[in-house]
Amino acid sequence: MPHGRPLRRHWLLDEGLRFLNHGSYGATPRAVLDAQAQWRSRMERQPDRFMVTELPAALEAAAARLAEFVGALPGSLAFVENATAGVNTVLRSLDFALGDEIVLSRHAYTGIRNGAQYAATRSGARIVEAQTPFPVTDSAAIADAYASAIGNRTRLAIVDHIGSPTALIHPVAEIVRACRARNVPVLVDGAHAPGSLELDLAALDADWYTGNCHKWLYAPKGCAFLCTAPRAQEVTRPLAISNFAGEGYWREFSWTGTRDPSAFLSVTAALDFWTEMGGAAIPAWNHRLVVEAAAKINAAWGTEPTAPEAMLAGMATLKLPWAGEATQAIADRVHDWLLAERRIEVPVLAFDGALWCRISGQIYNDLADYLALGEAMPQAL
């Protein structure tokens, strides 16, 4: 499979930028941006005809193609703008009561935590953190942390598929089974999973699963999905209730008011690009690249691995060789120096009393990008 710097021609990334943060916002390929532009042009040539006559069938076809890719049941997948919107959709659809509990990881993404806290505050519910360990030596510790957090008042468990700050693959199948056995509805935050992990959402059988397509699946920003099991569709309503209220899950989500649907419709072009560039070989390459890069950087810094290789996909979070105070202000300073002085874009984080950086691997990267980070970081600290 072709890989490395020659493939950068497919993207608009700045020349000379060592871009090691595909995991945050993705980077949309030129071919997919071209397809999106064509959808926008088609829409603007005759807006009324497009919105009323052409869009419903086109949107349904795009959703069906994506549903097949992620292994979702027919009729269970609806488009949302991002995984944060997907999680908030579920949180706003459920009626929590005083004393109810919402379980999430102590490393949950900030937007997800804030949405859960809002739902809890307005209802009198409370947040319970699963004490997910990091660094970690095996996935059983993650599953045990969720099992310990779930109690008699748990009304929803929000489970990361791949942790945002930690980059860890969580044992979601085991956690979902445990939740189902205790009659606890479960929502999987799969923000980083589509295009990065092989998915079979029908077999997973979570009540809800939300995932981004703009990260590892190459779709434009603003393309994500919420997959809802048939048993939960009646209570699941979009954040914006519009013209088709009460007409069923797909109908309600397909129209939430006037918006630019071109990102949703371009997911078919993204899937085509993913397939043409190597398909399932892409996440396998990204994984190998990140594992090798992490090993070399850890050796250079004298730091230890944060997780077994099997718990990593296309990202790895590395502990920085820093023994001083660990605040996000210091992390931001390090990030800014790396970008300004070495043209390296990589997220630098402060949590659990330490500084970390999260590297992403993508087919336009090569090992030299990470060796440059390994050499530059001690100077940035």
Image (cartoon, rainbow, N blue to C red):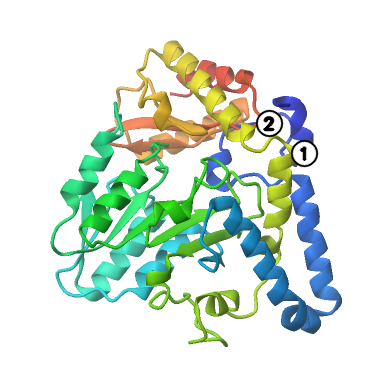
Where disc 1 sits, the SS reads helix
Query: Is there any visible trace of residue 103 in the rendered image?
Result: no
- Along the viewing direction, whichever of 61 and 21 lies nearer the viewer: 61
- Image mark for residue 364: 2
* Residue at the (53%, 28%) spot, across then down: 287
Task: Give x and y (percent) for residue 259.
Answer: 65, 74
Element marked by disc 2: loop
Q: Is residue 315 above or below residue 238?
A: above
Visible residue check, residue 345: yes
Looking at the image, which is closer to me, 3 or 70? 70
Quadrant of the snapshot with the C terminus = top left
Residue at position x 20%, y 75% from top? 97
Q: Residue at x 73, y 44 (%)?
A: 273
Q: Is residue 164 above or below residue 325?
A: below
Disc 1 marks a residue whose amino acid type is His
Q: Which residue is mark 1?
A: 10
Measured Cα–Cα span from mark 2 to mark 1: 9 Å
Q: Is residue 332 left or right of residue 62?
A: left
